[in-house]
Image (spheres, helix red, strand yellow):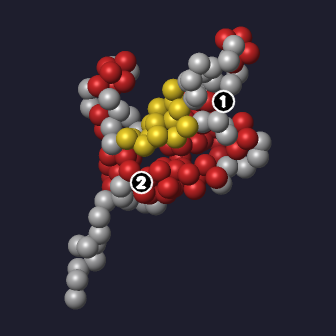
Amino acid sequence: MTEPWTDQLAPSLDDFARLARQAFDALPQPFASLAGEVVIRVDDFADEETLAHFGMEDPFELTGLYHGVDIGRRDEMGPAHEPARIFLYRRPILDEWCERGDVGLAEIIGHVLIHEIGHHFGLDDDQIHHIEDSTD
């Protein structure tokens, strides 16, 4: 008999992208249409330049990142020159999933994605955390 988990592989970048797309597709209206133009990208880690920008040395500190002009500032800044992007970082998310052990991987991916969509809507981390705390 094979031991449980001995034949399992770590979820790939494509697996993460599929889970992120499922979480995105499950967004209720009007959030889904407001976030509709966001491009979702999955990488193993943030690049060195991104980590340096946030003063981070440990690449496991950053699970996701919103890059773009939030929808609240678009009128004052004019049309965006490039699409808004959400980066999900596979290895830090996997690390958090393993450390927590009390929640499914799809739920963590969805949580990080929704957090970054909050930035797309113009919310800062404190506002997002306040919303998260009030819905727990």
Q: Position of residue 90 (x, y in %)?
A: 37, 46
Report how far apart the C-alphas of labels 1 and 2 lie in the structure.
Answer: 26 Å
Residue type at mark 1 is Phe
Q: Can residue 103 be seen in this view?
A: no
Query: Which secondary structure lies at badge 2?
Result: helix
The residue tagged 2 is: 14
Name the residue tied to disc 1: 121
Which type of secondary structure does the marked residue at label 1 adopt?
loop
> Amino acid under label 2?
Asp
Which quadrant of the structure image shows residue 8? bottom left
Q: Which residue lies furthest to the bottom in this view?
A: 1
The percent position of residue 127, horizontal first and vertical second, equals: 61, 29
Q: Which residue lies furthest to the front in this view?
A: 81
Dot 1, crowdedness within 10 Å: few (<14), some or many (≥20)? some
Residue 93 drawn above or below residue 15: above
Q: Which of marks 1 and 2 is in front?
A: 2
User: Picture coordinates of residue 57 (x, y %)?
Assistant: 26, 26
- Quarter of image, res 62: top left
Q: Is residue 132 visible?
A: yes
| Residue 120 in the figure: left or right of residue 34 | left
Instruction: Say the numbered circle drawn on residue 94.
Output: none
In the rendered structure, the answer to whether residue 59 lies left or right of residue 133 reads: left
Q: Are marks 1 and 2 in contact (CB under 8 Å)?
A: no
